[in-house]
Each structure stands twice: as structure tokens, then as C-alpha cells.
């Protein structure tokens, strides 16, 4: 392994770091001190080692056998938020909620980020969004480090942002993002965020261990709120219609409160969670002919360790 200034460890249990609290160990776990440290690590890392950047782990099922990769988690060297006119620059490790609050204090509207429990890096990678606004609507450009350890800047258009997806190349690590935000009154923005949080608590199992929406909504693949988008067919509805609200497998359950939320009721394994998700896909297909697609990223090896099935989506 390359010499680093940050923290590099072996066999780090990822269950401690994912919202669902499941997942075996990562072979290597690296927390770079700063961008130069990250560049040196990636440049010195042999091409045979896979690289997986991880944010807050709020959209992941890491399988029970863990991840044969170097997991990179950004922390303190990537936590700055700077505001310049109507532009907001945020380090990739900054929690989305924090960016929304800082922007609002400066009279800038990035309120759509307030209720998303991940980091800026994960938000860009997933083109996160809610209440009709997505990262694609506000992102100007990103800074990233390539798998070869080179620093690059890419425009939002280069990232090919679509519904909950970006075309970021495998092994690239986002380090900073710049958003253009519409102006707003700080008090109004603060009030709107409070209302969004209350709406969340009323409709979603925010106190449970989940990874947000389990499946993409079957219609509506545009990312920009453009005219003609159809978000009418909801995953929760087809799951509910198939009688799967509250369905269980081991410690995994489709939430009673919101049937598109897969939750860990306490002792679920990744296999319980993924297995229940697959069962739901099959039964929904039998019931309605609709093939649900996973929104949660599933990565790593099953507990047997034999067949690696990394989700390449
Ligand atoms: C209760 C709850 C509510 C949610 N509500 C929403 C919602 O309203 N809207 C929404 O869009 N999502 C929602 N989510 C899902 C999740 O929060 C988002 O997908 C979020 O953007 C993931 O960010 P993260 O930092 O946790 O990324 P992770 O889950 O750690 O990773 C997700 C993906 O991003 C990649 N990634 C992370 N950081 C980087 C980086 N620095 N560079 C390159 N790639 C990176 C990972 O490799 C992985 O592919 C919700 C989740 C929960 C638990």
C-alpha cells in the first residue's frame, strides 16, 4: 500500500458505517488527510485493487461478506463550505443538511438538500433530490480525483446526471461540488426546511434504520423536473397493492409507514434485506407486471465469499 498521511486500516467493518447497520469488512479503508494525500494514494495503488468511495452510507447495502476493495471515506480535509455570490462550493464530505442550512443563512435556496441524510459526494453520484428539485438542477461543476490519482474538474453536463444516477467513472472520487442557488429570504428558507422535515417525519420511517427509497419509481426517469416528466407511478403504491406493506424476512421489513422503505428492525443481515427486496420485486412483477429496479446500491460479496456480485450500476 502507498505511504499516506491520512488513516489507512485493514478489515474495517462497514456495518458500523452504513445507515442500515449491515455489511462485512472492507479489505482496506482509507481516510485521506487532504486532496494531495488522496491523489498520492490512488496514483500509488495497483490497478488490481478496486476503489469504492463511500459517503454517509445512506444508500447502500454492503453484503455480509464485505468488500474486496479500498474503501475511501472523506472527512476533515473535505468539509469546507464557501459562499461566493449565488455560488455555493461544498467539500464532498459535507452533510447535505449542513449545505442547505449554510446556504439558507446566506439567503440562497438549496433547501432540497435539507432532508437528504447523505454527503455532497453521495448526492452528486446519486443525483439526489426531493420535492421536485435534483442535484442536476443546481450543480455547476465538480472537482474529482481519477482512479489514476489525477485532479480534474468536470461540468455538471459531463456527469450525465439522470434519475438517481450519474455516469461518474468507476473509482473516481468526488472531492468538491459547486452549486448555483436561487436567492431567497433566510427566514422563509428556514421555515420551508422545517416544513419539509415535518412532512418527512409524518410520511417516512425517519427513526428506523433504512437506506431511503428501496426501488426507483417505475415512471419518471428524467432528472430535471422538465415538462412531460411522469412521477405518477410510485414504487410504494405497487408494493402496497401487492400486499407487501410490512412484509418481513429475518430482521428485514418493508416499513408499515412507507412500503418502499426497507428497514432493519434490529438484527437483519444484508442477506435478509436484499433477499426481501428480491422477493418484493418478484411478487410485484407477478401482481402488476412491473419490474421494480433497485435504487439502493448493493455492493460486495455474499457471506459465503464465493461469488462476487458487485452492483455496477
Ligand atoms: C431516511 C432516508 C431518506 C432518504 N431520502 C432521500 C431523498 O429524499 N432523495 C434522495 O435522492 N435520496 C434519499 N435517500 C438516499 C441517500 O440519502 C442518497 O442517495 C444520498 O445522496 C447518498 O449519499 P451518501 O453520502 O450516504 O452516499 P453513500 O450511500 O455512501 O454512497 C452512494 C453512492 O455514492 C457514491 N459516493 C459517495 N461519496 C462519493 C464521493 N465522494 N465520490 C464518488 N462517489 C461517491 C458511492 O460510491 C455510492 O455509489 C434517503 C436515505 C435515507 C436513509
Image: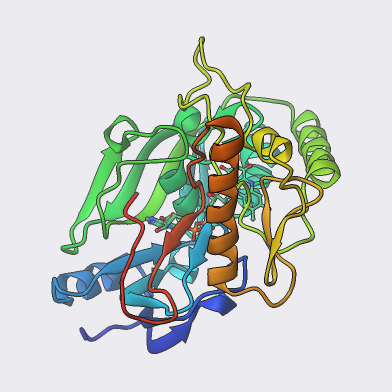
Front in this rendered view, residue 199 or 218? 218
Q: What colour scheme was applied to this rendering of the protein?
A: rainbow
9 up-or-down from 78: above or below: below
- The residue under the point 32% across, 49% down is 143
Residue 84 image point, x, y percent: 49, 37
289 up-or-down from 306: above or below: above
Residue 91 in sight in this render: no
204 up-or-down from 92: above or below: above
Front in this rendered view, residue 130 or 193? 130
| Among the 4 quarters of the image, the one containing residue 211 | bottom right
Residue 297 image point, x, y percent: 46, 55
- The residue under the point 61% across, 46% down is 213
Q: Which residue is most to the front?
A: 286
Taking the image as shown, residue 134 lies to the left or right of residue 47, namely right
Residue 96 image point, x, y percent: 59, 50
Q: Which residue is most to the bottom?
A: 10
| Among the 4 quarters of the image, the one containing residue 287 | top right
- The residue under the point 63% across, 54% down is 117
Taking the image as shown, residue 66 lies to the left or right of residue 284, namely left
Quadrant the N terminus occupies: bottom left
Front in this rendered view, residue 149 or 128? 128
Residue 197 in sight in this render: yes
- The residue under the point 30% across, 41% down is 167
Amino acid at each position: 500500500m502507498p505511504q499516506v498521511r491520512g488513516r489507512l486500516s485493514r478489515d474495517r467493518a462497514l456495518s458500523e458505517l452504513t445507515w442500515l447497520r449491515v455489511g462485512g469488512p472492507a479489505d482496506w479503508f482509507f481516510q485521506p488527510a487532504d486532496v494531495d494525500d488522496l491523489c498520492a494514494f490512488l496514483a500509488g495503488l495497483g490497478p488490481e485493487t478496486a476503489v469504492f468511495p463511500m459517503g454517509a452510507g445512506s444508500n447502500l447495502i454492503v453484503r455480509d461478506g464485505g468488500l474486496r476493495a479500498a474503501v475511501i471515506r472523506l472527512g476533515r480535509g473535505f468539509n469546507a463550505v464557501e459562499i461566493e455570490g449565488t455560488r455555493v462550493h461544498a467539500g464532498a464530505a459535507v452533510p447535505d443538511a449542513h449545505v442547505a442550512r449554510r446556504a439558507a443563512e446566506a439567503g440562497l435556496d438549496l433547501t432540497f438538500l435539507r432532508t437528504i441524510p447523505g454527503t455532497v459526494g453521495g448526492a452528486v453520484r446519486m443525483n439526489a433530490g426531493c420535492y421536485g428539485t435534483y442535484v442536476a438542477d443546481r450543480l455547476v461543476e465538480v472537482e474529482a480525483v481519477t482512479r489514476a490519482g489525477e485532479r480534474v474538474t468536470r461540468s455538471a453536463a459531463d456527469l450525465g446526471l439522470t434519475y438517481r444516477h450519474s455516469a461518474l467513472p468507476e473509482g473516481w472520487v468526488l472531492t468538491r461540488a459547486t452549486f448555483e442557488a436561487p436567492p431567497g429570504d433566510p427566514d422563509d428558507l428556514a421555515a420551508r426546511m422545517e416544513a419539509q422535515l415535518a412532512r418527512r417525519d409524518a410520511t417516512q420511517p425517519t427513526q428506523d434504520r433504512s437506506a431511503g427509497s428501496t426501488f426507483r419509481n417505475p415512471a419518471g426517469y428524467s432528472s430535471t423536473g422538465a415538462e412531460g416528466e411522469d412521477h405518477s407511478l410510485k414504487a410504494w403504491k405497487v408494493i402496497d397493492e401487492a400486499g407487501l406493506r410490512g412484509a418481513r424476512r429475518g430482521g428485514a421489513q418493508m416499513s408499515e409507514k412507507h412500503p418502499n422503505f426497507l428497514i432493519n428492525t434490529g438484527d437483519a443481515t444484508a442477506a435478509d434485506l436484499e433477499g426481501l427486496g428480491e422477493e418484493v420485486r418478484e411478487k410485484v412483477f407477478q401482481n402488476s407486471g412491473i419490474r421494480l429496479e433497485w435504487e439502493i446500491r448493493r455492493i460486495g460479496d455474499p457471506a459465503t465469499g464465493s461469488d462476487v456480485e458487485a452492483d455496477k450500476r
